[in-house]
Image: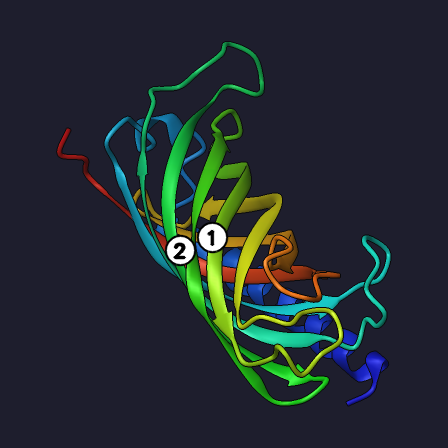
Amino acid sequence: MSKQHRLTQAGLLVAMFLGIVLWTSPGVAGERSSFDAREVMRKGVFELGGAVGYAQGTTAIGAAESANRSAVFVMPRAGMILTEPLGRSWWQGNVELMIEPVVARFTKPFAAEAVGGSFVLKYNVLSFGRWMPFWDVGAGMVWTNLAPRIPEQSTQFEFVLETGPGLQYFVTDRMTWLMGVRLHHISNSNLGDRNTGINGVLPYIGISFFTPGVF
């Protein structure tokens, strides 16, 4: 599959996602201009959902020999909001802790799998009505049979670091569409003979549901 074809597919995916958001907003949500994410995003509330994404390797960061590393990611998520809203300006928000399992299918440089998960800290900005920007940072572990068949890595158990911005839109007071992008890093922390690391850009889209808290 050519690079141009992949970019076209990614563009269509984003366009479809935005179209669904705009199409469902008036009918399902009623477009209540008075809606405030602060009404839902309270301490103890749970988030349950999932996302799918496509990671593309990059040599812009790190010392990897090739950007020919691509994978489809499936990422269920379960989280709980840890704090009441913090701050008083436009950046007012709260902190959420999520557990995010991951299953990935590499398509380049050859077919391979990865299975694991991460703990993710997420800061939700609550000042924009139905739109909720966020930034998250995560760390975890995966097993992958991509290694030791690639020059970057010599061990199958790898550590994961990831971070990036995203955006959620409240279609109802309990359901959001979500999209985001992460810088995604895989390495073995020098536990093997080779540890150049794999860096990639991981855009993703998904859906989440918020349930009343119990704490």
Horizontal and vertical percent position of residue 8: 77, 77
Badge 2 element: strand
Please name the amino acid that badge 2 sits on.
Glu
| Residue for badge 1 | 140
Farthest left residue in view? 214
Q: Residue at x 63, y 79 (%)?
A: 148
Q: CA distance from mark 2 to mark 1?
A: 9 Å
Horizontal and vertical percent position of residue 194: 71, 66
Q: Is residue 176 visible?
A: yes
Instruction: Classify 215 as above or below 167.
Output: above
- Viewer-closest of 159 and 3: 159
Badge 1 element: strand
Q: Residue at x 72, y 75 (%)?
A: 69
- Viewer-closest of 15 and 80: 80
- The C terminus lies in quadrant: top left
- Viewer-closest of 144 and 137: 144
Looking at the image, what colour scheme do you see? Answer: rainbow
Q: Quadrant of residue 55?
A: bottom right
Drawn side of residue 36 relative to residue 190, left or right: left
- Viewer-closest of 192 and 202: 192
Drawn side of residue 2 relative to residue 198, left or right: right
Q: Is residue 130 visible?
A: no
How many numbered discs sit on the rendered protein? 2
Q: Residue at x 56, y 64 (%)?
A: 17
- The N terminus lies in quadrant: bottom right
Instruction: Classify 65 as above or below 185.
Output: below
Please name the amino acid that badge 1 sits on.
Gly
Instruction: Tell me the number on the disc at residue 197.
Output: none
Instruction: Tell me the number on the disc at residue 100.
Output: 2
Q: Quadrant of residue 54?
A: bottom right
Mark 2 touching mark 1, by CB under 8 A? yes
